[in-house]
Image (cartoon, rainbow, N blue to C red):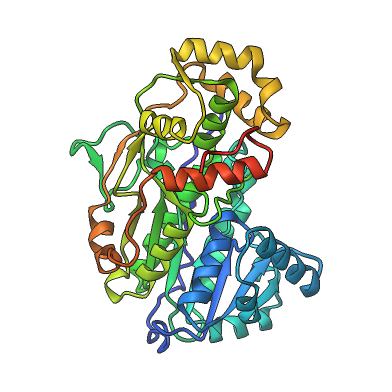
Amino acid sequence: MAIPLDLRAEAHLDPSLHYRNPLSAHWQQPRTLLLTGATGFLGLYLLGELLTQTQAQIYCLVRANDAAAARQRLQGLWQEYQLDPSLGDRVQPLVGDLSQPHLGLSATAFTELGSRLDGIYHSGAGVAVTQPYDRLKAINVGGTQTLLHLAHIGQTTPFHYLSSLGLFFGQGTPAQGRFQESDFPEPASVKGGYKQTKVVSELLIQAAQERGLPACIYRPGRILGHSATGIIDLIQNPKDFLFILLIACVQLGCYPQVEEAIEAAPVDYFSRAIVHLAHQPASFCQVFHLLNSRPSTWLDLVATTQGLGYGLEGVTVEAWVEQWRQRGAAVLTPPLQGLLSQVIEARGTALFPPKPGIDDGQTAQALGTIAGAYPPPSLDKTLLQVYFRYFHHQGAVSQPPLA
């Protein structure tokens, strides 16, 4: 019989780590930052926002053979995602690996890096959701442990961790009806290696907070494409099932009539919110639930899509799944067809599995200072038009949206 995984026991923080040194003097106007996960979807836009909102030089940890290859990889992504290339002058690729001791750096280079930092943004992770905990532990848990050591070098370095609201999925309904920012999932009931590593990382950060580390945890919800370009990685972004389903509906000419709340926002809104929150003294040792405070529904989304000129007939979920099984291979490109087939075979007619209520009251209050400049976007015709233009350009839908 397999021994049950004890996630609390896995969250062992080095006893020598106590964050007693003064806080970096430049944390609000940082000169040097470290970002992990800069080649991921959210991490890439987080990098762009850090470059926009600060004047810092930003070290980006990248797995590559050498610095030239790392820079080439970042530049290729910047071009693909239409980010401002002029901002890249302040980006310093750092060849390394979260799964390795000292991030794959020499001990000297690791210490020198830690002594210069004014902030650490940890967005990097292995995101293969089908992999067990043991396969992801080195990069996701070990990487967090190593970065907590890095924050201990020299002056105490503020630490910002990107987690996920998915930790609460499968947790049932809390007594108060919605999970608050102060709530934590019951570790024993969290399933899936990826989510388990996120739980352990949050526990490690909580332990570091208790020892004096000014750390923030951000739990984003469903992340959509950029609001100006529509760009979204439909293959690598693990939260994109919503739009793959919607694309399939457009191509099939029908949609499943099902009620589902859609609390989603563009990636640029989330990245902007994270960087804003990170520079507020009141944010230290807080958890933030990143949602769209102007939620929509699946049927609203369908109605807006119909308004863009796409003829969609409402059918039962069972009828839609049958249509998909008969014609799906012919209407979607192979990568999207394969992804959606996996989800449908796993879920059957439960296209939207039950999910708990999530409260973002503390986060909404903290973001109130930027509400005028950056209001949470609604999934209206203007935004959907941007997305479907991108989908058509990529060949995912056969017709462009109406102007």
Q: Looking at the rendering, which quadrant does residue 71 occupy? A: bottom right
Front-most of 75 and 284? 75
Examine the rendered structure and indicate whether residue 25 appears above or below residue 9. Answer: below
Residue 109 in sight from this viewpoint:
yes
Q: Position of residue 5 (x, y in %)?
A: 50, 39
Q: Position of residue 298 (x, y in %)?
A: 39, 31
Q: Looking at the rendering, which quadrant does residue 15 occupy? A: bottom left
Front-most of 151 and 354? 354
Does residue 322 appear to the left or right of 298 in the view shown?
A: right
Does residue 361 appear to the left or right of 239 in the view shown?
A: left
Q: Tell me which residue sits at (28%, 63%) in the image.
A: 371
Q: Position of residue 244 (x, y in %)?
A: 56, 34
Examine the rendered structure and indicate whether residue 260 appears above or below residue 257. Answer: below
Does residue 161 appear to the left or right of 98 in the view shown?
A: left
Q: Tell me which residue sits at (32%, 74%) in the image.
A: 280
Q: Tell me which residue sits at (55%, 68%) in the image.
A: 47
Q: Looking at the rendering, which quadrant does residue 209 occupy? A: bottom left
